[in-house]
Image (spheres, rainbow, N blue to C red):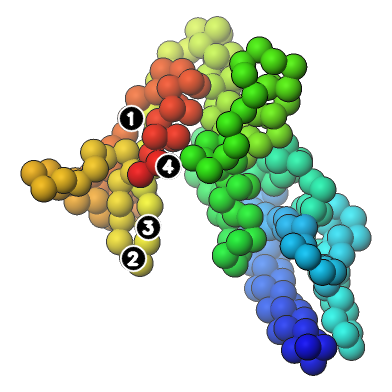
């Protein structure tokens, strides 16, 4: 009913304000733009009914309640019409490029169930994705490009940069690890599945003497080509 919708809007507004206060406190302590935490917001189109979220511009979102509204600014805001490419280029892309310059980088997708995290991150690699049109058809490339999420685009950029550096005389090798943390338990998605005769080796998180975090026991799978990398991720996502 109307009262419940107002209450939900007020709670969401309070949560958004709290999150922005925490973010502002952290951002004010950072002086290096290249390594600061960036926060972007993607708005999923409403599934039936009207949305209480309005995107004012590329950095501002407004939450419309029955009695009041709240506006907040982020490093990037994407409305329901934003493409996967837009989200990557302005959202995750800068972190990927920073990692290629030697910085530790993390892309974290956070949101409630059904908000679109999996599509944003793994779009184009999921078993549930629609099958693309036949290769070579006029629509095939456009369909694949439209669905490709952060992981597909990050891998593509990684191999493009590697090719340029190899052409300049550098020798490079690329390997992937892929593990899941669920209920504080780690599972290596590249490890052979468990069976009655085989148990995957234990995987655990540790910190070395320099304070660097690493995962012990995780598989590092060499991927000589972008096609091999995509196959490895698709295979892991089917587990």
Q: Which residue is mark 3?
A: 181
Q: Which residue is mark 2?
A: 184
Closer mark to the observer between disc 2 and disc 4: 4
Residue 58 in view (yes/no): yes
Tell me residue 123's x, y (percent): 59, 41
Residue 221 is labelled as 1
Dot 4 falls on a residue whose secondary structure is helix
CA separation in Å, label 3 and label 2: 6 Å
Q: Is residue 226 above or below residue 103?
A: above
Label 2 vs 4, first from the N-terminus: 2
CA separation in Å, label 1 and label 3: 19 Å
Q: Quadrant of residue 147?
A: top right
Tell me residue 36's x, y (percent): 64, 53
CA separation in Å, label 2 and label 1: 24 Å
Q: Crowding at label 4, few (<14), some or many (≥20) Cα neighbours within 10 Å? A: some
Nearer-the-camera pick, 158 or 193: 193
Residue at x-position 85% and y-position 69%: 50
Q: Is residue 133 above or below residue 212?
A: above
Residue at x-position 90% and y-position 55%: 57
Residue that extends furthest to the bottom in the rendered view of this protein: 3
Q: Which residue is mark 4?
A: 237
């Amino acid at each position: 009913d109307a009262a419940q919708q107002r209450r939900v809007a007020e709670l969401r507004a309070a949560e958004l304000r709290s999150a922005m206060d925490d973010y502002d406190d952290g951002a004010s302590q950072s002086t290096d733009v290249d390594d600061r935490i960036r926060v972007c917001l993607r708005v999923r189109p409403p599934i039936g009914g009207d949305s209480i979220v309005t995107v004012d511009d590329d950095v501002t979102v407004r939450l419309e309640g029955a009695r009041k509204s709240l506006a907040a600014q982020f490093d990037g805001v994407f409305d329901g019409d934003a493409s996967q490419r837009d989200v990557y280029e302005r959202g995750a892309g800068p972190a990927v490029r920073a990692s290629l310059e030697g910085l530790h980088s993390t892309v974290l997708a956070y949101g409630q169930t059904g908000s679109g995290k999996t599509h944003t991150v793994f779009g184009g690699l999921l078993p549930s994705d629609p099958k693309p049109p036949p290769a070579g058809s006029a629509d095939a490339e456009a369909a694949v490009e439209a669905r490709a999420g952060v992981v597909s685009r990050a891998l593509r950029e990684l191999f493009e940069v590697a090719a340029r550096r190899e052409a300049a005389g550098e020798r490079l090798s690329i390997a992937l690890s892929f593990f899941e943390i669920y209920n504080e338990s780690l599972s290596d998605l590249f490890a052979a599945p468990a069976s009655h005769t085989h148990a995957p080796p234990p995987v655990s998180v540790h910190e070395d003497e320099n304070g660097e975090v690493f995962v012990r026991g995780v598989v590092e799978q060499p991927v000589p080509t972008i096609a091999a990398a995509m196959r490895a991720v698709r295979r892991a996502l089917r587990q």
